[in-house]
Amino acid sequence: MLVSRVLTDLQQEFPKLKVEAVDILTNPGKAFQQRIKMIPTLQVGEHRLSKFFLGPAAIRNFVKQFVYAETEE
């Protein structure tokens, strides 16, 4: 999966980045609770990035804007 590869690479660049994968087939309740309606979905607090295709640049921008900003606080 492209998204997981990009996130793995970003974890090395941003050591405070924590990734939790939710498998909606084996854990539909958790996906429902987290309001995941499309795959893939990246979520930080109330911020979401969800598109049919998430390219590396979009993922990196999301991480830099929301994930890394929240770990700095």
Image (cartoon, rainbow, N blue to C red):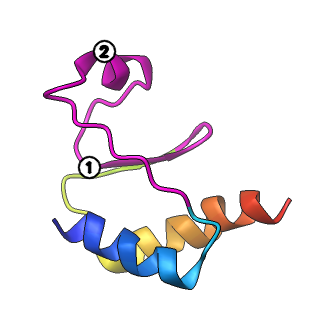
Question: Is 58 rendered above or below residue 25?
Answer: below
Mark earlier in primary sequence (2, 1): 2
Q: Main secondary structure of the magenta part?
A: loop
Residue 1: x %, y % from top left: 16, 65
Question: Is 20 covered by the magenta stretch?
Answer: yes
Residue at image position (22%, 44%) is 39
Looking at the rendered structure, the kind of residue marked 1 is Pro
Q: Which residue is mark 1?
A: 40
Residue 47: x %, y % from top left: 57, 44
Distance, label 2 to label 1, CA atoms, is 17 Å
Looking at the rendered structure, the kind of residue marked 2 is Gly
User: How crowded is the residue under tag 1: few (<14 C-alpha within 10 Å), some, or many (20+)?
Assistant: some
Question: Is 72 covered by the magenta stretch?
Answer: no
Q: Which residue is mark 2?
A: 29
> Which mark is on residue 61?
none
Residue at image position (74%, 57%) is 70
* The residue stretch that appears in magenta: 18-47
Q: Nearer the viewer, residue 42 or 16?
A: 16
